[in-house]
Image (cartoon, helix red, strand yellow):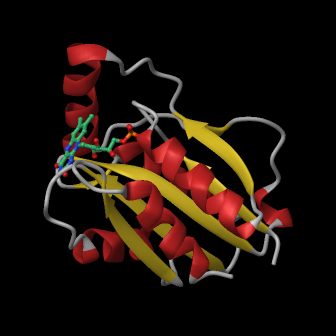
Amino acid sequence: MKTLCLYYTRTNTTKEVIETIAQTIGADVAQYTDGKDRKGILGYVGACFATVNNVISKVSVKGEIDLRSYERIIIGMPVWAEGPCAIGRALIKKYFNEIPAEVYYVVTHMGEKNDYMMKIKAMDELLGKPSAGYVSIRTKDNDYIRESRTFAETLI
Ligand SMILES: Cc1cc2nc3c(=O)[nH]c(=O)nc-3n(C[C@H](O)[C@H](O)[C@H](O)COP(=O)(O)O)c2cc1C
């Protein structure tokens, strides 16, 4: 099944998770971004503000990627302010017409809480169709690479 794994990352964790998943299932990988430098404390504050106020004005997938040429897409996004980051939501809003039928969401987060079901459901509404599945992966004090691989193995 031709699969594309997409990720947004600020500190490379979601990148690692998505690259592990892509390697495990033999998928292509691409990064999406809003083009803003969100490093450091100012970047952190800006990211919180953008998520709470939902004010991402532009987002794009890097490289020459035609989303329509894939049968399955896995979208990785870090949790910001208790929900998938605003940049991930902006991606879905922008590309909903091009995203194939089978979509999975992978959210990475630091905290113990891992039930982001309500927020994932909100993304289903944005996309206009239910996702085929999702996983939320805790990154702190957790072997998140092993967990990513375990999730990926369910997709083979
Ligand atoms: C602005 C901001 C808000 C965050 N809010 C949360 C949160 O509410 N809950 C949580 O568990 N982690 C939160 N985190 C931590 C990230 O979700 C976590 O470190 C993630 O794996 C980072 O992915 P990245 O390295 O790909 O950017 C937040 C991080 C940032 C930058």
Quarter of image, ligand 1: top left
Residue in front for this viewpoint, 42 or 13: 13
Q: Is residue 96 visible?
A: no
Q: Front-most of 40 and 146? A: 146
Based on the displayed image, in which of its 4 quarters is residue 118 positioned? bottom left
Number of marks in the rendered image: 0
Residue 143's place in the image compared with 58, above or below, is: below
Q: Position of residue 45 (x, y in %)?
A: 19, 25
Residue 48: quarter of image:
top left
Question: Would you say 68 lies left or right of 138 here?
Answer: right
Percent of width and height locating residue 12: 46, 34
| Above or below 57: residue 43 | above
Please report the residue visible at 59 percent of the width from the left and 65 percent of the height from the top: 74
The residue at 46%/21% (across/down) is: 36
| Of 16 and 52, the residue lying toward us | 16
Residue 128 screen position, x and y as percent = 50, 77
Choose between 44 and 96: the one closer to the eye. Answer: 44
Q: Is residue 62 left or right of residue 74?
A: right
Residue 67, how many percent across, how many down?
Answer: 76, 58
Q: Quadrant of residue 117?
A: bottom left
Q: Is residue 10 visible?
A: yes
Identify which residue is drawn at 47% across, 67% down: 105
Quadrant that contains the C terminus:
bottom right
Residue beneath the point at 80% across and 47% down: 65
Q: From the image, which quarter does the N terminus lie in? A: bottom right
